[in-house]
Amino acid sequence: MTGASGPPPSPAALPPAIDIRDLHKYFGDLQVLKGIDFEVALREVVCVIGPSGSGKSTLLRCVNRLEEPTSGQILIEGEDICAPHVDLDRIRTRIGMVFQQFNLFPHLNVLGNLTIAQRKVLGRSKPAAQAKAREVLAKVGLLDKIDEYPGRLSGGQQQRVAIARALAMDPDMMLFDEATSALDPELVGEVLAVMRSLAEEGMTMMVVTHEMGFARKVADRVVFMDGGVVVEEGAPAALLDEPTHERTRRFLRMVHER
C-alpha cells in the first residue's frame, strides 16, 4: 500500500517563487516603475540588466518591500506581500538580500555579524546560530575569518560575509542588487564564484547585475529593463547575442565598447 502523500510536486506545479504583477512605483511625481510584469520560477536564476536609472534596483527593493510599491501585486510563493496586515518580518526571513554595500556591523566580528539576526529574528539558540554561521562561512570559503572584524577584510571578503549572513537565515530565495559594483575588479570573481555555486545548488535567485559574462553563464533568463519597463526578456544567448529591440542592441553595444 503506497503512502497518501505521494511524490513532491514538481517545480512547474508550484506557484512562482516571485510573481510581479502590474507593478508601479512613484517617487513624488517621478514614475520609476511603469507596470512591471514577470515571474521567477522556483530554482530559476533571473538576471536583470539595463542602464542606470532604468528601475532595476527599485524593482528589487520592492520585492521585499524595502520600497513600498505604489500599485500592483508582488506574490512570494503565492502570498501577496502587498496585502494589508501581511507579516513582513516573516516574509523577509524567506528572502535573502545582498546589497552593493556590505552593511556589516563594524563593531561585531564575522561570527557576531552572522548570529545576531539568527538569534533575534529566528530565535535560534547561541550554539545553533554559531553552528549555522560556521556552515555558511565554509560554503563561501571564509571559515578561517570567523573571528575577524569587517575592517580587516577585503571588499570581496566582506561581500562574501554578507552573502553568508543572508544564507544563515535559510532563505527560500536570494536577491542580489549589483553585488559586485563596489568591488575592485580583481575581487569581483570571488563573489561571482559564490553566486555561481548557489545557482548550481538550485537557489532561486533574482540578480541585478552589469556582469554580462555572469548573466550569460549562470542565468536561466535575462530581463532587460529601460525607462521603468521590461523591454524584452529571454534565454541569455538569445537576448545577449540576438536582441529583438533596438534599445537592447544599443545598450549591449555600449557595454561591449567599455
Image (tube, helix red, strand yellow):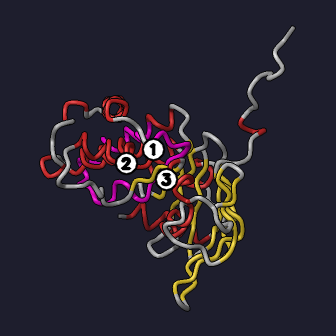
Question: The disc labelled 3 sits on which kind of residue?
Answer: Leu
Give SS at disc 2.
helix
N-terminal label among 1 and 3: 1
- Residue named by callout 3: 175
Q: Where does the magenta region start and end?
A: 168-196
Residue 234 in sight in this render = no
Give SS at disc 1.
loop
- Residue named by callout 1: 122
Asked if the residue under mark 1 is in contact with the one under mark 2, i.e. CB atoms within 8 Å, the reply is yes
Pick the quarter of the image with the N terminus. Answer: top right
- Residue named by callout 2: 117
Front residue of 25/242: it is: 25
Q: Residues within 10 Å of mark 2 (few under 14, many from 20)?
A: some
Asked if the residue under mark 3 is in contact with the one under mark 1, i.e. CB atoms within 8 Å, the reply is no
User: How far is disc 1 from disc 3 in space, using C-alphas?
Assistant: 20 Å
Q: In the rendered view, would you say 69 is above or below 239? A: below
40 magenta-colored:
no
Residue 98 in sight in this render = yes
195 magenta-colored:
yes
Give me the residue at 45% from left, 44% from top. Answer: 122
- Residue 69: x percent and y percent? 60, 73
Q: Residue lying at the far bottom in this picture: please name it.
A: 29
**Of marks 1 and 3, the one in the foreground:** 1
Front residue of 112/209: it is: 112
- Residue 141: x percent and y percent? 29, 32
- Locate residue 219 relative to residue 1 in the image: left or right: left
User: How far is disc 3 from disc 2 in space, using C-alphas?
Assistant: 18 Å
Question: The disc labelled 2 sits on which kind of residue?
Answer: Ala
